[in-house]
């Protein structure tokens, strides 16, 4: 099974109309394995983690009533809330950085951060923690908990600085020079299964060239800090 196309399920639930309704749905999923959740949604589990890339997020969208699909809006438009799964180990240590959204590589220099897809997606996020160490079979991975995140003024300012620095490099034709080292909270990295996927970008001399698509990712070190704060409040 591959998830290049949207996961289709006969299971249907209406979009949550309040955070309280969404929280109730989330609480019912805690402790459940992906096998149990797939059975509930009447979908087949992927054969492995490679073919199942993106499966967990799409499964949760179905079960929680997310309605955005592939539109450039938060997953729960009524609540202005984005859904992100976060793979963790037994100690709630994040196992990877978190993809937020695709990065535009044909940049309009006049665009403001506040009008960007990144701002739209990152303003309010529902993180769902999924126990997913590499050695754990896909069917046995399970929901560990969740957290609603809104960046405070300091965090939002740092994210804006990251976005402005990265998009300035894009506009100057320096996409190929961008590495994961750039950015305090947000980094820009290739977003494609392999090198065969290409998209337009601004080249060093201002002409349009081809490159791998890029995405904005939240650093693993930052999500670790979020989890540490949760642990402090709930020892």
Image (cartoon, rainbow, N blue to C red):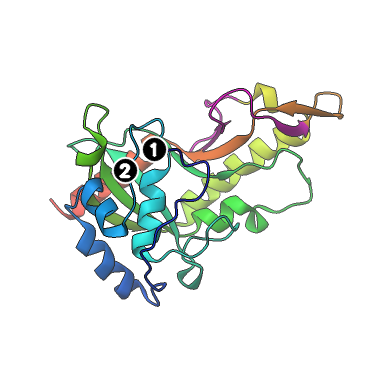
Q: Are marks 1 and 2 in contact (CB under 8 Å)?
A: yes
Indicate the secondary structure of the residue bearing disc 1.
loop
Residue furthest left as drawn: 235
Q: Residues within 10 Å of mark 2 (few under 14, many from 20)?
A: many
Instruction: Say if residue 54 shows up in the picture.
Output: yes
Residue 83 drawn above or below residue 199: below
| Residue placed most toward the observer, 195 or 94 | 195
Residue 186 drawn at (x, y percent): 51, 39
Q: Is residue 3 left or right of residue 114?
A: left
Mark identifier at residue 52: 1
Residue 201 drawn at (x, y percent): 76, 33
Q: Main secondary structure of the magenta part?
A: loop
Q: Which residue is rendered at x = 40% and y = 58% of the image? A: 9
Residue hosting label 2? 45
Residue furthest bottom as drawn: 17
Residue 174 drawn at (x, y percent): 73, 26
**Residue 94 falls in which quadrant of the image?**
top left
Q: CA distance from mark 1 to mark 2?
A: 8 Å
Residue 39 drawn at (x, y percent): 25, 54
Quadrant occupied by the N terminus: top left
Q: Magenta includes 197?
A: yes
| Residue placed most toward the observer, 66 or 121 | 66
Q: Earlier in the sequence, mark 1 or mark 2?
A: 2
* Camera-nearest label, 1 or 2: 2
Q: Which residue is rendered at x = 25% and y = 31% of the image? A: 133
């Amino acid at each position: 099974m591959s998830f290049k196309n949207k996961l289709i399920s006969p299971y249907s639930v209406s979009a949550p109309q309040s955070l309280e309704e969404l929280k109730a749905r989330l609480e019912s999923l805690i402790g459940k394995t992906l096998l149990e959740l797939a059975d509930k949604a009447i979908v087949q589990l992927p054969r492995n983690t490679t073919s199942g890339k993106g499966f967990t997020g799409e499964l949760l969208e179905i079960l929680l009533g997310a309605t955005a699909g592939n539109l450039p809006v938060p997953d729960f438009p009524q609540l202005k809330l984005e859904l992100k799964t976060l793979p963790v180990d037994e100690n709630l240590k994040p196992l990877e950085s978190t993809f937020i959204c695709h990065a535009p590589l044909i940049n309009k220099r006049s665009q403001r951060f506040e009008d960007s897809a990144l701002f739209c997606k990152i303003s309010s996020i529902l993180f769902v923690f999924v126990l997913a160490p590499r050695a754990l079979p896909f069917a046995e991975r399970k929901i560990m908990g969740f957290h609603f995140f809104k960046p405070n003024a300091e965090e939002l300012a740092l994210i804006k600085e990251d976005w402005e620095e990265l998009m300035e490099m894009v506009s100057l034709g320096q996409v190929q020079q961008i590495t994961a080292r750039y950015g305090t909270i947000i980094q820009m990295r290739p977003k494609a299964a392999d090198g065969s996927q290409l998209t337009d970008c601004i080249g060093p001399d201002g002409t349009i060239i081809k490159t791998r698509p890029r995405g904005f990712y939240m650093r693993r070190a930052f999500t670790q800090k979020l989890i540490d704060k949760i642990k402090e409040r709930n020892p």
